[in-house]
Amino acid sequence: MCEIIALVSKKGGAGKTTTAAAMTARFTAKGYKVLVIDLDGQANLSYSMAVNSSGESILDVLTGEKDIKSIIQHTAIGDIIAANARLDLADIKLTGGRERNLILKRELKSVTADYDFIILDTLPFFGVLTLNALAASTGVIIPAKADIFNLNMFKRTCDFINSARKALNPDLKLYGVLLTHFKANTKNTRELLELFQQSAQENNTRVFNSKIRETILIQSAQATQKDIFTFNANGGASQDYSAFIDELENLIKGDRK
């Protein structure tokens, strides 16, 4: 069974793209077949994976101009459908009421048999592309920077996901919130963690036990277009993401029993 996981947050800088790249690399290293789709017109994920972002994007599939299999690019750490600036036009290009939010779900059916995981890196905007991602997914993760602004946005993101679940995808699982830029052993962080846990409980989800510490290694890896495990296998961020992905893998296996 293919697990389709959307990374969603309305707050920029929360770690969606970094998490998508890490999940792609780590799951591939574990022997899974992985496809990641860059749904953000900024194309940061596409850049970090060193693929061509000047060609077709998922928008060409959603508008019926391209077959989804024809635009998949292959890399050593997994397959990717790259983004380009045309994605910014999605809310204009895609019409048709509720049905326009279900196009990605329909198109992914032709590739789910080829992959164990499909990861959707969304943009920090609750438009048609994010709705398509939520409608198509089996589960969703909310990356959130460990600060008060992200806590407030976490609550709004949960509300949006719950609304999308009711309208488009009643089986959508909210796997939890992944705290990033985490500074352990500070009073402010401990207080924020308690507030995130309370808010997660109110939304019938969890804060992952694994936290991603704040480190310059993530930005350095992105700048060199390498995944964090290749860039520094023993670094703190690599250890944190390995722990998170192991935790997520066990959670998914538990849900399937």
Image: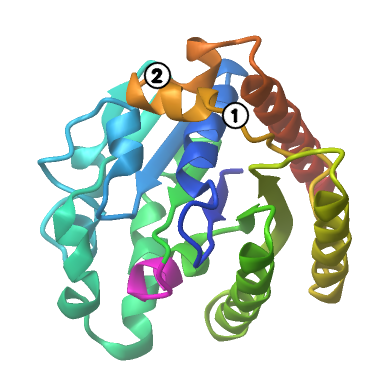
Amino acid residing under circle 2: Lys
Up/down of 23 relative to 157, above or below? above
Q: Secondary structure at mark 1?
A: loop
Task: Please tell me which residue lies in front, 180 or 229.
Answer: 180
In the shown orientation, is residue 86 left or right of residue 191?
left
Report the Cα–Cα distance between label 1 and label 2.
16 Å
Q: Farthest residue in the bottom direction? A: 97
Q: Nearer the viewer, mark 1 or mark 2?
A: 1
Tell me where residue 131 sits by quadrant. Answer: bottom left
Q: Secondary structure at mark 2?
A: loop
Is 10 inside the magenta-drawn segment?
Answer: no
Instruction: Tell me if residue 172 can be seen.
Output: no
Which secondary structure class fits the magenta region best? helix
Tell me where residue 98 sits by quadrant. Answer: bottom left
The quadrant of the image that shows the N terminus is top right
Q: Are marks 1 and 2 in contact (CB under 8 Å)?
A: no
Q: Which residue is tagged 1? A: 215
Where does the magenta region start and end? 125-132
Is 127 inside the magenta-drawn segment?
Answer: yes
Task: Please tell me which residue lies in front, 149 or 243.
Answer: 149
The quadrant of the image that shows the C terminus is top right
Residue 46 % position (x, y): 29, 37
Label ID, residue 92: none
**Label located before the other in sequence (1 or 2):** 1
In the shown orientation, is residue 88 left or right of residue 174?
left
Residue 121 % position (x, y): 44, 50
Residue 227 % position (x, y): 46, 22
Up/down of 76 relative to 84, above or below? above
Amino acid residing under circle 1: Thr
Up/down of 76 relative to 24, above or below? above
Residue 150 % position (x, y): 62, 63
Q: Which residue is tagged 2? A: 226
